Amino acid sequence: RGLASAAQVDLVEVGSAPSTVDADVLVVGGPTHAFGMSRSMTRRDAREEQETVSPGDGIREWLSGLGSVTVQAATFDTKISRPRLPGSAARSAARALRRAGCRLVARPETFYVEDKAGPLLDGEIDRAKEWGNRLASVVAGRTPGR
């Protein structure tokens, strides 16, 4: 919602994302599984636990097939709040995007969930909207307020 307040946003589930990027800014996000981006095995395990999971490839596979991309980008992930575990799908995705040629416009961001299946903790939706507002400011070339 924050980014959409200043730009057209197309939300695409990774399983149906195109292999080429035609955008001014690319925002990639997903859950942290086993300390990083999901793998087919971690998505299978999540599906067995009745969690919402992409029916096809995850962001790891999509990013590995992306090729060269020279757009602005940002990443986010979701993680359980307790216990606080190391690793971040957002940081892993950011590294992959940098290798592909993207210019990151924000640090990778984490939004916390109560349990593996969610929901987001109180206040996290507002924090995500503010993060989107800051992205919109950076993409538009304005200095974001804090």
Image (tube, helix red, strand yellow):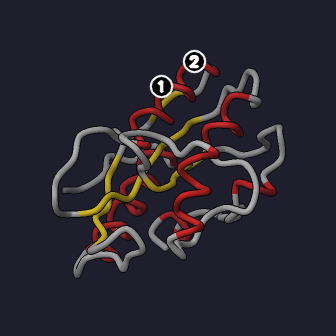
Q: Residue at x 47, y 25 (%)?
A: 95
56 relative to 78 in the view: left or right:
right
> Quadrant location of the C terminus?
bottom left
Task: Answer above or below: position of 86 versus 84.
Answer: above
Q: Residues within 10 Å of mark 1 (few under 14, many from 20)?
A: some
- The residue carrying mark 2 is 99
Q: Amino acid at mark 2?
A: Arg
86 relative to 131 in the view: left or right:
left
Q: Residue at x 72, y 46 (%)?
A: 23
Query: Horizontal and vertical percent for residue 109?
Result: 33, 49
Query: Horizontal and vertical percent for residue 34?
Result: 40, 44
Q: Are marks 1 and 2 in contact (CB under 8 Å)?
A: yes
Query: Horizontal and vertical percent for residue 107?
Result: 34, 38
- The residue carrying mark 1 is 95
Q: Residue at x 45, y 32 (%)?
A: 92
51 relative to 110 in the view: left or right:
right
**What SS does tag 2 mark?**
helix
